[in-house]
Amino acid sequence: MVILHPHFHGLSHQLNQPITAQFATVLEASTKRRSHCRYEPHGTNGRQRRGRRDRRTTATASTTLAAKRRQVFDTTHGPGSTTGGGRPRVESSASDYFGFLHHNTDEDIHVFEEPPEVHVLGGRSQESWPTRYVEYDVELKYKNFKWKVEIPKSSIQSLWFHIKSRPHLRHAPSTIAADERTEHGAGEPGVPEYATPSESRWPQLRKLFLTSSEKSVNPEMVALVQQLLETVVKVPRLLRSPYVAAMFQVSNSTFDDEMGRTSAREGWLKTRFWLKGNRENVRINRASASCDNECFNCMCVVKRVNFRAKRLRWVSLKTSSIAIFDSIEDTIARKAFLFDSKFNIERGLATTGSSTTLLVSNATYVLQMEAKSKHALTKWANDIRRVAEASNWSQAHRDGSFAIPRNPAHMTSFAQWYVDGSGAYEAIYHAIMSAKKEIFIAGWWVCPTIHLLRPAEQYPESRLDLALQKKAGEGVQVYVLMYKEVSMALTLNSMFSKQVLSKLHKNVHVLRDPDFLMKQLGLWSHHEKIVSVDQRVSFVGGLDLCFGRWDTHSHELFDEPGKPTDFVGKDYSNPRVKDFIEVDHPDEDMIDRNEVPRMPWHDCHCRLEGQPARDVARHFVQRWNYSVSTRKKSRKLHHLVPMKDYPITTIEKHGPQKLTKRLQKAVHAVRAMRGLSRARANTDNRGFNSDRRMARMLSSQNESGHMPILQDDNNE
C-alpha cells in the first residue's frame, strides 16, 4: 500500500502512469506547494533560510532533469512506453559516469576487418600470494600478423557476464564459416550470408566458473574457452567491442601497413608522466626521505612528493618507446617515453612504495605506471625490460655518444647532396607531395610563403603553405617546430609564420621554442634545418625554408630582362644593404631591383633515405616532445612516437665484383691519395721528386683507366 500526503490526493488519478513519471510529478507538485506556502518559525536565521533555499533549488533541478528524461523517453518510445516488466526505460547517469571513468565498452572500435583466428594453446595455474591465477595462452592470427596473449580466467568470466548483460550482442548476426553456413541453409535462395547464432552455439561455462584452479587448465576446460573465443570473434558487434580488443591487446594504433604489428604489449594502466628536473628524486616513495624539501627543509623525515594525479590510460609498448593514449580508440599518442642510454626501471616496495607500481625513467622523463595486481605488473615489467634490452637505443654507445654507431654493411641507406637551394627545394617539394602520414619541419626561420619551385608564376602551387595545406587536407599530420627569436635582436617574426600555418588546417601543428628566461637560459638559437617525410626520407643541411636561401649555380645578381623573376617580394634581398623588415608583407620589395643587386646564397643540403633518415626523424621527435613538455601553452599538443628501426640485413663483404664502377674508382682514388701522402713524407728525407712521382701516377691512370695502388717506398 502506498500512502500519499494529503496535499497530493488530487494526483491519485495519475497512479496508472509509470513510476518515474509519477514520482517526478509528485516531486514537482511538492516543490511548488512548498515554495508558495513557506512558513518560517520565529528565530529562524538567514543561514537556515539559505539552506532551505538551496535544498529547494536542488529539488527543482532534479525535477527539471526528470522532466527532460521523460521528454526524451516519450519522444523516442512514445508516451507511456515501457520495457520488459512494465518498467520505463530510463538512462542511468551513475552507470554512464562509472563507464566513462574506466573505459566505454559499448562503442565500436574498428580494429579487425575480418575475424582473426584464435587458438588456445593451453592453460596454467600459478600461485601469487595471496591469489592463485589461472591463465590461458592464446595465439591469434590476423592477416599476416601473429601474436600471443595471456588471458586470465577472470577476464573470461568478465567477458561472459559482459555478453550476458547485453542480449543484443548475444543475438547479433555472426560471421559463420562456409561449412557451417551449409548446415543453416546459407547459400540457398532467401538465406542471408549472415545467420543468427542460436543459443546452443554459446558454450555453457558454468562448469568452468565453478571448478577449482587446478581443474581449470584441463583439456575439457581449455576446449570451452576455445569455443567461447571462436564464437565471440564471429559476432561482428563483439569483435568491434573495446572489451574484446583490450583482451586481445590490440587498438587502433596496433597495426600498420608498413611496420606490421607495432606493439609488444598493450593494456590499461594508471600512469603519471612528468619531466625530470635537475634535482628530481626518482624514488618518490616512503623508503627514501629527503631533507631538501622546499617547505620543510628542517625536517629530515619529510620527502619530496609528486602531486600529479595518476590517470587511467591505454599504454602501448613499442620497440623503442612506450606510447600512452587517452583511450583505446585513439591513433595519436598523448605522451611518449623513448628508450635511451639512461633507461632505468624500478619496482617493488623498496623503490616505489607499492607492489603494484612500476617506475621507468630515462634522461628526460619519469613514467610511473600502476597495474591492478602485482601479477599483472610483473608481466609488464618483464616485457618492458625485455624490449628495452633488445633495443639499441637503451645501450651504452661508444664514447658516451647519444647516437648509435651504424654499420652501412648491415642496412641499406642512401644519401644525395645538393649544392645551392634550387635542387634541394625541388627535392623537398616532391617529398612533401608524396607524404602519406606525417611531415616534420624544423628550422631557424620558416617562411610560409616561400616558393619551392621557380619561377613562382609558373608553379604557384609550390608555395610552402599551399603544399602543406593540401597534404593536411588529405589527412597528413604536419608538425612545424620553429625557433622563437628575441624580437629586439632579430626580425624573423616567427609569430606571423605560426599564425599563417596554424590557420591552414587542424592537422597542422606549430610550436615555437624556446621561451627565453634571460637569467637561466641565456641567448641561444637552434640552427637545425630538418624536413622529414613519413620518417623514411629526411633532409638536413644549411638551407632554411625562408627568404634569401633559394639560388642556382650561376648566382645571378639581377633579374633577367623579359623573363619571370625567380625571387618574388622579399626573396630578392641583400642583408648587407638592408636587413629583413616587415616580413608579414612578403610580396613587398625591400630594395630597388634595378639599382641594388641581390646577395647570392651558396650552401649545401643532403637527402637521406633508410635508417639514417629514421634517425633524423627520431631526433625531431625528441625535440618536439621536449618542447611540448616544457611549455604550458602547448599542453593541447601531443607527443610524437618514433617508428621502429629498419631490420638489420647481412650483406656479403664487398669485393671488386660487388662494387660498381663508380665506387671502384672512388676506392682506388682513396688508396692512391694514401700512397701519395706517404710518398710526400719520404721526399723530405730522400730528396725524391714528388712531381715526377705524381706524373708517373697520372700517366698510369690514363693508361689503365683507374687510380693505381702505390706501394711503399721501402718495397721498391
Image (cartoon, rainbow, N blue to C red):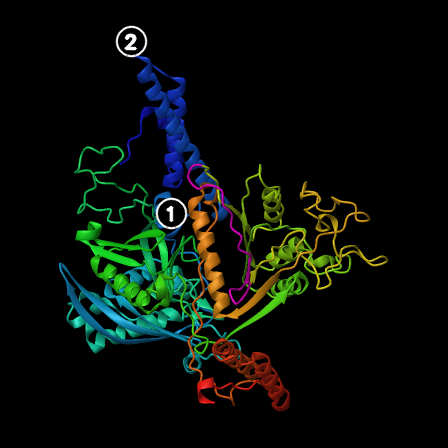
The numbered dot on residue 42 is 2
Residue 713 in the image: state x and y as whole percent: 47, 85
Q: Report the amino acid beneath label 1.
A: Asp
Label 1 element class: helix
**483 sits left or right of 241 in the view:** right
447 on left or right of 214: right
For disc 2, the neighbor class at 10 Å (few under 14, some 14 to 19, many from 20) is: few
Please name the predominant secondary structure of the magenta segment in the image: loop
Task: Mark 1: give few (<14), some (14-19) or many (20+) Cα within 10 Å.
Answer: few
Percent of width and height locating residue 70 = 44, 40
Give the residue at mark 1.
96
The image quarter containing residue 22 is top left
- Which portion, as a residue range, is magenta? 519-539
265 or 480, nearer to the observer: 480
From the viewer's perspective, is 434 left or right of 291? right
Residue at horizontal 25%, vertical 41%?
304
- Amino acid type assigned to the residue bearing label 2 in the image: His
* Circle 2 SS class: loop
At which x and y percent is residue 492? 61, 44
In the rendered image, the residue lying farthest to the right is 562
